[in-house]
Amino acid sequence: MLTKLRIRNFKNWADTSEIRLAPITVFFGSNSSGKSSLIQFLLMLRQTAESPDRRRVLHPGDQSTPVELGTFRDLTFAHDLLKSISFSFEWKLPKPMTLADTISKRQFSGHTLSFQASVAFDQKDQVPRISCLEYDLLGSQEPLQVALKPIGTQNGTRQQFALEATPYKLVRNQGRAWQLPPPVRFYGFPDEVTAYYQNASFTSDLALSLERELRRIQYLGPLRTLPRRSYIWSGEVPDHVGWAGARAIEALLAAADRKISPGYKRPGHSFQVVIASWLKQMGLLEGFSVRPIAAHRKEYEVVVRTPSTNADVTLPDVGFGVSQVLPVIVECFYAQPHTTVLLEQPEIHLHPSVQMTLADLFIEAVQSRENGEPRDIQLIVESHSEHFLRRLQRRVAEQKIDADQVALYFCRRGPDGAILEPLKVNLFGDIENWPDDFFGDEMGEMSARLDAAAKRQAEAR
């Protein structure tokens, strides 16, 4: 689970400052205020980890990725190629990590890893280059710090790097006095590390842990796929519901044998029952099932029943909101343990009362269990919904979720880039630093309406 994030000189962010990330983290704000950029940044890091090109420092995206961010110039704050994009993030490990010195046998253990890096644009070669990177294994009495730092150029063309570890003592192999080449992608140590040092094989464990954390990031965009009258499923188990929710029904069928419990010592239910109960709790459907169209066929249909009729119909015959929220519900419970799910505008096309219920859905999702173990999933949400926020505040006040399990932020435009304001939520669910015009000028609108009404009454006399 990601616990901290900081980004500098990325798109409209000169500096986000340190962002605390909780199991439920929500970014509010006006259009073009920078909310989506925060999600795009995490997606870009994942895309880079998945890219087959190990020399590519950052992968802004293409037609096959969830986001396409253009060139490095498009990525940098104020489109200034003289600025370096620097970032840091921290994550809690699913299991504690132990790294051992193969020579001294000394061990370093921790349950948290942090990473930081800086990427600059090489004006000569017209490509981005890693300036430096650093890992910190935290949680023990003596943290382990491992870094790759630049030390100059080789033959005037290639940058060289030095490997440093504190308080770990690195031992060189004899006859291997050369310096190291640049890192792999933005986070990996070059292959020469293990050839040049007798006891540096642990560096691959650090890079692998970061890669695994990035691969645990899933994304569901704001515009979900239109519903169909039939779906084809050949038995494949998808990784997630898809960037636009196109594989939600496949995921639902693939999870038929899974049982999800809403919390500690609470009974579990089959996956389809969990999904159906949430659709009913939202007041959208009375009945929901996915069944084969005919025996020994790959075609399936989603059969639903609305509160206003007793007739069974297929998904395209009900309100558009059902098909838009269904992938959200499925992804919340389909995501594997320790997954971070990025959600953009989950409330889109939903009635205000349903938007409120999303808060309850998210709370249950992060508290849910499977096979008796916590799923420990994380939801990072970009939203415009006041109704969703109000229900979340209420649940904090009702102690349905601890205040420290929720992190709320307000994004706004400033003269020197986007500004991120942490919202202080107390134990009673109150926001102690409510920003001006958070959801528009409600009092101003009410005052203007009352003035207009008084004017018309005066004219009628």
Image (cartoon, rainbow, N blue to C red):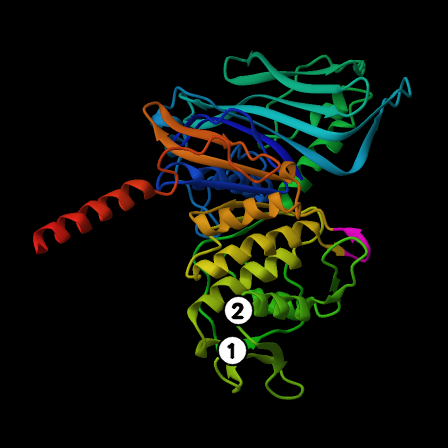
Residue 312 % position (x, y): 53, 85
Disc 2: which residue = 283
Is residue 91 in view from this perspective?
yes
Whichever of callouts 2 and 1 sits on the residue coming sooner in the sequence is: 2
Instruction: Kindly indicate the quadrant of the structure image that contains residue 212.
Output: top right
Element type where label 2 sits in the image = loop
In the image: residue 151, left or right of residue 348: right
Disc 1: which residue = 307
Instruction: In the rendered view, tell whether residue 182 sits above or below residue 64.
Output: above
Q: Amino acid at mark 2?
A: Gly
> Which residues are the magenta region?
370-374
In the image: residue 282, left or right of residue 12: right
Q: Would you say the magenta stretch is mainly helix, strand or loop? A: strand
Q: CA distance from mark 2 to mark 1?
A: 8 Å
**Which residue occupies 46% across, 40% down?**
60
**Which residue occupies 43% across, 72% down?**
319
Instruction: Kindly indicate the quadrant of the structure image that contains residue 178.
Output: top right
Quarter of the image with the C terminus in it = bottom left
* Camera-nearest residue between 298 and 433: 433
**Which residue occupies 18% across, 48% down?**
454
* Camera-nearest residue between 61 and 32: 32
